[in-house]
Amino acid sequence: MVGAVGTAVFVYAAGYLEGHPRRGSLYGLLVLFLVGMVVTVLADDVVLLFLGWELTSIASCALVAFEREEASSRAAARQALLVTGLGGLVLLVGLMWLAQLAGTHQLSALIDALPRLPAGPAGVGLALVVVGAFTKSAQVPFHFWLPNAMTAPTPVSALLHSATLVKLGVFLLARFDVGASSFVGWSPTLQIVGSVTAAWGMVLALRERDLKRILAWSTVATLGTLVVLVGLQGSQIATAALLLAHALYKAPLFFVAGNVDHACGTRVIDRLGNLRHKMPWTAAAAALAALSMAGLPFSFGQVAKEVMRTAKDDSMLWVQVAQAVFGAVAIAVAAVASVRFFWRHPGENITPPAHEGGVLTVVPPLLLGAGGLALGLFPEVAAPWLEDAARAMGGVGRLPAPDRGATLGTLVVTLGVGACVYKYWDPLHFFLERLAARVGPIGMARLYERVVGAVPRLGTALVPRFQHGHLPGYLALTALVATAALWLPSGPWTWPQHATSPGMLAACLLIAAGAVLAVVLRRRVVLVLGVGLVGYGTAVLCLFVGAPDLALTQLAVETIFVVVAVAVLIRLGARKEGLAEPRIRWGAAALALAFGGGVVALMLATTGAPADPALDAYFGAQSLPAAHGRNVVNVILVDFRAFDTLGEVAVVVLSCLAGRALLSVPQPMKTKEVFDNPVLQVVLRPLCVVLLVAAGWLWLRGHHAPGGGFVGGLVAAGATAFIALAQSPALAIRRLPLRSARRLGAAGVLLAGFSGLPALVVGQPYLTHLWTSLNLGFTELAVSTVMLFDAGVLLGVWGALAGYVAGLLSQEAA
Amino acid sequence: MIVLVTAGLVVAAGLYLALSRDVLRCILGLLLMGSGVNLVLLATGRFHSAQPPIVAPGATVLDTAAASVPQALVLTAIVIGLALACFSLALVVRVVGESGDDVATMPGVEPSVEGHKPAILEPEVPESQGDFPPHEAAGGPR
């Protein structure tokens, strides 16, 4: 069915959009849409089904917005996308829910399993699926998007809204009906919602003057009927019949509407009339389709009606009433769509010069309309398809032989009522228009408008609250959330088992003193010294807990940090003691203490448990055999995790380069020579030699004893800083290897990176270090690419920091 | 235990400073928080031994020693922390130099969190902060 209508649409679109600049993209979207349809229908996996479902939503949104210059098109597309998209999300949740419950993603297995699932949870999932299907099929609270989507080009409307897209919801419900009909509330829900939709759609159809919108509302009504049929027991054959009949008559009617619009420039029914002379073929198509829609004898619509009537025998009374209304109004709509403006002449209209469109615009509706008639005359042809479809929906049924005599009575009655509605279409219309004006404000459409309209306003209200540009505010909020997160998982607190040595105690006191100093005394120098004290204290602590590498590094880092920070202070120092703030900022203090307490709590909750020794044991066991190093920490850095270290060196070099660049802008500030000290001048040269030798020694021994490239680089950078302080930054830079800090840093990173290449040559992973022994005669000297790597680390850190410090200090001298 | 409390104290001091509107205090506070977190990391090694993780001469496998993995992590963290300090201090110099103002707020917004006005809040917007467009009080959807 999708294929047949799709083909007709393609041919029709060719004629309808002749010469349209974006016809190609329309075809592309249509194909995309059809792919989505086919995927959805054929999918037997819930995820695949959802993907196809969403694909149709997106493609239809793009199609509705095809006339993208029109604001109304864009609004309609947005509405369609939001409603069906949200419905899709609900559907996804429902499907996942059910899939989890049933333990399978296979749709057929899932549906089979439905009756066996616990009723409560499965009911919730099922309800979500139903809501998703309702949005797609434009059922009553979600009906409003369909008529608005009529701004799409007519071929699109015909495809999307008559035959395919909106039927997806019905299709899904029908598939689930097999397993879900045992649930309490399934049938009543479908029957009630479907009936309300059918009746309401018909009423709204009467209200409209626009031909396409009339058709759209009648589509809504038909969808309601379909949903009712799904909800009824043993009505599968009727569902299939109506589905087919509706596709066969609604698509041609849309085509007809499109032709009329094309020819006359309007679709408002008041202005049209007597078109049969101008557009005979279109009129014929309209008549064929209308016959079927009205369910007149010898049309397939009548067959469908017949099946429906037999199916509905056991339904609730008011469902039947709603369906009676539906039948009557359907006839009227059919009449309006065909008789009114092709044969009857309303009189007052000014019809623009109308003409028949090309052959391509006439043949598809004629064919589909004729198909409806043909199937009506020979229902046996359609019977196998319908019975197949019904079986797929889990029902057994035979297409009853049309009993034309028996239904003649009811037919006459509905025809009569329909004729009356047609006759008094205009008065009814005005009555309903007034009624709708009263009811309008409580509709879903209004709710939609409010919600969509509220989004920008909400954003306007919220964004300044969170994006206020107030830095401490951001930080405070972040810290608040982090504090909550820290306190949340607190398990049982366990006091750590280890003994506290006097050394550790002293170090901790040192650290605490630094932290307290930094906070309490508010002079900037004290602040820097306090931070430095924390660092030195940490170094001392490291000594006492068996981390000599850390102690060395921390010591060197802290020294350089204090030098840098003091230099910065001098840069700022001419100015002021910072910002005057209150003595104690209570809010910040409370937050900070809560945060710090949270850290302690978290640590108590985690470190009470014994550590997993696996990693430490692995590195401890592999360090010497695999990496030829005794200093496990250094081996981890330069060998096991060398790639990380390479990246870290690059980070150090880059950030120092960036800092250097930030400092390089000339500043108008007056500065003075601070370290112009004769004693310093004398000891400088030997001191620097000692420092550089120390750096080299640290590098060489790093693999087996505390030391390594990082510390070596830091110590070497200290030497450069000394020269820069005592003599001049320019001189310090000239004394560097390569005579440039930038070149040195880059060379370091390159060297470190290069040291991993030989491994590639011998087929090992990058940065696997190779070892060999050089026989120097008097001793064996082990050499390795790892030494190159660590040398690269050293040079990189040295170059980066030297350049940075020199830049900072040359600001001073400038 | 004492190390944990100390780490918490350092983190708290760092956060307190970081919540200041003074740029330098803010930056140093963040660095202090980093030090505190390093202590925390170190403490995950449990301090069960004061022996450095160095394979003794003659042995091939590490005997009982302090945990090596946290140390390796902290070591890189320390060096990266220094790089961070260098860069952010350069930023401080630059920001203060260009705006003449140590207040760590974006221009044109009255601070409200701490409930008091800064002592020096220059009325004119420094033109240097072109990378960060001035906050629009009116807001609006993007």
Image: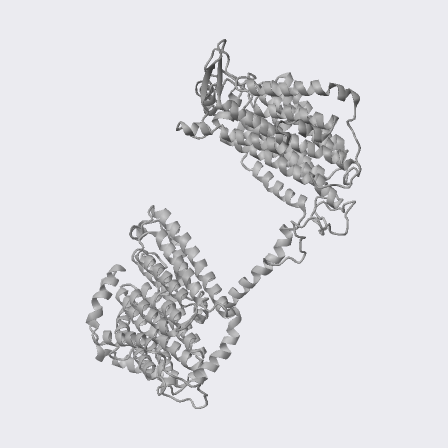
A614 displayed left or right of A418:
right
**Residue at position x 42%, y 52% from top?**
A93
Which is more toward the observer, A644 or A760? Answer: A760
Asked whether, in this view, residue A545 is left or right of residue A670, the answer is left
Instruction: Give the residue displayed 42% in from the left and 84% down from the top.
Output: A272
Q: A133 and A798: which one is in front?
A: A798
- Quadrant containing the N terminus of chain A is bottom left
Where A303 sits versus A611, above or below?
A: below
Taking the image as shown, residue A325 lies to the left or right of residue A706, namely left
Judging depth in this view, the residue of A544 and A776 nearest the camera is A776
Residue most extreme to the top? A778
Residue A811: quadrant of the picture: top right
Q: How many marks?
A: 0
Task: Where is residue A680? Give x, y as percent.
Answer: 76, 21
Please tell me in which quadrant of the rendered image residue A711 appears.
top right
**Residue A636 locus on image (x, y percent):** 50, 25
Specify the quadrant that holds the C terminus of chain A: top right
Any part of residue A492 in sight: no
The percent coordinates of residue A467 (x first, y second) are: 63, 51
Answer whether residue A17 is visible to the viewer in this image.
Answer: yes
Q: Which residue is outermost to the bottom?
A: A347
- In the image, taking residue A304 as reference, residue B135 lies left or right, namely right
Q: Report x, y in % for residue A544.
A: 61, 18
Q: Is residue A481 above or below residue A453?
A: above
